[in-house]
Amino acid sequence: MSSIYDVLLERGYVKQLTHEAEIKELLEKEKVTFYIGFDPTADSLHVGHFLQLMVMAHMQKAGHIPIALIGGGTAMIGDPTGKTDMRRMMTREEIEHNGNCFKEQMSRLVDFSDGKAYMLNNADWLLDLNYVNFIREIGVHFSVNKMLTAECFKQRLEKGLSFLEFNYMLMQGYDFLELNRRYGCIMELGGDDQWSNILAGVDLIRRKEGKPAYGMTFTLLTNSEGKKMGKTEKGAVWLDKNKTSPYEFYQYWRNVNDADVEKCLALLTFLPMDEVRRLGALKDAEINEAKKVLAYEVTKIIHGEEEAEKARSAAEALFSGAGNLENVPTNTINRSMLNMSLLDVLVELKILPSKGEGRRLIQQNGLSINDAKVTDINRVLIEEDFAQGFVLIKRGKKNYNRIVLE
């Protein structure tokens, strides 16, 4: 039987390790408590977090204990990683609400019952720190010269890095130290953009406690062109069904590039790797079957089997004339919106992000109403459009919405 380290390696998660041989042996022979940090800057996780949840789920299934650490303290400063501008500081109430939303979403993959996993908030130890004591105890172990070589700081130096943000690495390192002291946590995991911060924590524990600590990063969820996945014309692909409907979520994965199918199946589903490789090897029209499997499996993990079935049925209704059209994302309008500009209606319903986007779609023959191309940017929505009981809007080749009249 392969170890969890071999599973993570085979599925393509592992990017960098602080102590490869030791980590491999540790994960094979011991039950390890590890943590991953989550920045509570929104009230939902998004596709970028999904991969981290999958790692937590795989690790937990192998008997290891996850800690999901909500950055309630650090979110009041802002992580400069991957950002060109300083993040907005948040209130405690916002952070607590967002953390509660995260836990509900994480619970689909991670079992938090009976000490099998923990959700903690670093505000519990960061907000009451005495600054002078903190700098004396922690700051003495950090070299400014070394910190400035970290990629997260390099990117910000050109525009100006505030001292507020410069503290972030110290705080994240201190998080690891506190979790080590309180919960025996010996490993920090995270996306590869967190490598510098993870190294800081590993080094701090070894210096302060004289004990081993480890770090592992996993690959970021990018497409074959190296761009981060999880963005659409309407913004981020969220795990909250009220922000991104299960149908839209399903369609996002149904429409991934052919070159990304095998990678997504490996990273974002629990399908055996033999099946992942078989599906990933399909070519031309057959790769669409692999995309359907990917979309269904991913939607089932995040939204449950019932929603995945509905999304699949809606997709079949639109593309093959079978299935239930009622599961297509639906908006209801009242009669006061009749005879309004179609673009105004679509923007108000958030089907389109802006009228400018609508005009661009029309110019590119990418917007249809009831299977008829919209060619006039001043086209209005009239009662006759609802002859079949609803209006079907199509954006691009594969994005559909229904509009129902009250």
Image: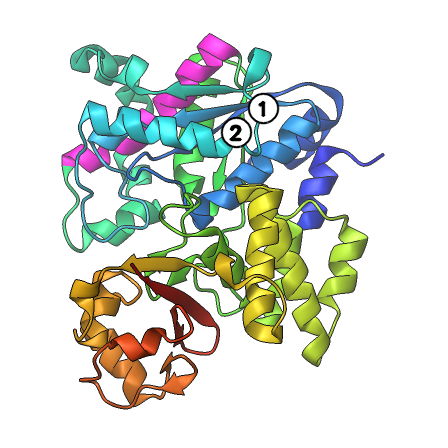
Residue 184 left/right relative to 169: right
From the top left corner, tell me how far across and down residue 325 is, in percent: 52, 64
From the top left corner, tell me how far across and down residue 382 is, in percent: 24, 77
Reply yes or no: does residue 173 show up in magenta.
yes
Q: Quadrant of the C terminus?
A: bottom left
Q: Quadrant of residue 335?
A: bottom left
Residue 351 visible within the image = yes
Q: Are marks 1 and 2 in contact (CB under 8 Å)?
A: yes
Q: Which mark is residue 111?
A: 1
Q: Quadrant of residue 65?
A: top right
Residue pointed to by mark 2: 107
Relative depth, front residue between 147 and 285 = 285
Residue 118 left/right relative to 149: right
Q: How many marks?
A: 2
Q: Which residue is depicted at the point 61% across and 72% down?
A: 258
Q: Which mark is residue 39?
A: none
Q: Give the prevailing secondary structure in the magenta stretch.
A: helix
Q: Amino acid at mark 1?
A: Asp
Q: Quadrant of residue 254?
A: bottom right
From the top left corner, tell me how far across and down residue 379 is, in percent: 22, 84
Residue 207 visible within the image = no
Q: Spatial distance from mark 1 to mark 2, Cα to Cα?
A: 6 Å
Secondary structure type for disc 1: loop
Task: Answer above or below: position of 322 versus 363.
Answer: above
From the top left corner, tell me how far across and down residue 377 is, in percent: 21, 85
Q: Which residues are magenta?
A: 163-183
Q: Quadrant of the N terminus?
A: top right
Q: Amino acid at mark 2?
A: Ser
Task: Answer above or below: position of 55 versus 319.
Answer: above
